Image: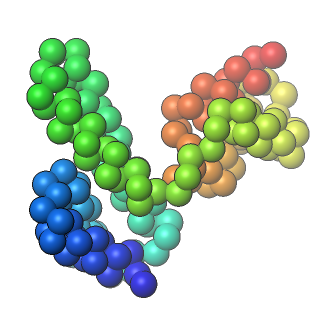
Amino acid sequence: MTFEEQINSDLKDAMKAKNAVALRGIRAIKSAILLAKTDGTGAEIDEARKIQMLQKMLKQRSDSYDIYVKQGREDLANVEKEEIDIIKTYLPAQLSEEDLRIELKAIIQETGAAGPRDMGKVMGIAGQRFAGKADGKVIAGIVKELLSQ
């Protein structure tokens, strides 16, 4: 079953269950799929593109959530949080910080990175290897910490 077929199936299930939260989140994903299909590239939505698309949606909603919380708009923050939870169900399982730290130490040894100026080398490999499995900010923070030691 392709990603688009899965989303369509989940959308039908959410409609039958009258689950407004799931409907809102899945409709947002369906909208992103339609935009991706009509962006002019003609590229199929493979696993990498799916993860990229979902991460972008997650980042947008996380940023909005943070803004709403700072402004004291709990009603809007809750809506964003619900959509974040729905989007996360379609992403691969996230690595724990300690697993990520172990993997990043291995990448640092592979690349021979010695200090903060080698951060780009490490981040390039880590970005590809952990796409969808860890947040870029978390990866960057750990890499910076490890290379500063």
Residue beneath the point at 53% across and 38% down: 136
Residue beneath the point at 25% across and 76% down: 8
Q: Quadrant of the C terminus?
A: top right
Q: Residue furthest bottom?
A: 1
Task: Evaluate whether residue 124 shows in this view.
Answer: no
What scheme was used to colour the molecule? Answer: rainbow
Q: Nearer the viewer, residue 28 or 15?
A: 15
- Answer with the quarter of the image where residue 33 lies: bottom left
User: Does residue 139 appear to the left or right of 43 in the view shown?
Assistant: right
Residue beneath the point at 41% across and 65% down: 50
Vertical position of residue 131 compared to residue 41: above or below: above
Residue beneath the point at 22% across and 38% down: 80
Q: Nearer the viewer, residue 9 or 50?
A: 9
Task: Evaluate whether residue 97 shows in this view.
Answer: yes
Q: Position of residue 20 (x, y in %)?
A: 13, 54
- Answer with the quarter of the image where residue 140 lies: top right
Vertical position of residue 64 compared to residue 7: above or below: above
Q: Nearer the viewer, residue 82 or 66?
A: 82
Q: Residue furthest front?
A: 17
Vertical position of residue 146 compared to residue 139: above or below: above
Q: Position of residue 81 (x, y in %)?
A: 27, 37
Q: Position of residue 133 (x, y in %)?
A: 57, 50
User: Does residue 91 appear to the left or right of 124 in the view shown?
Assistant: left
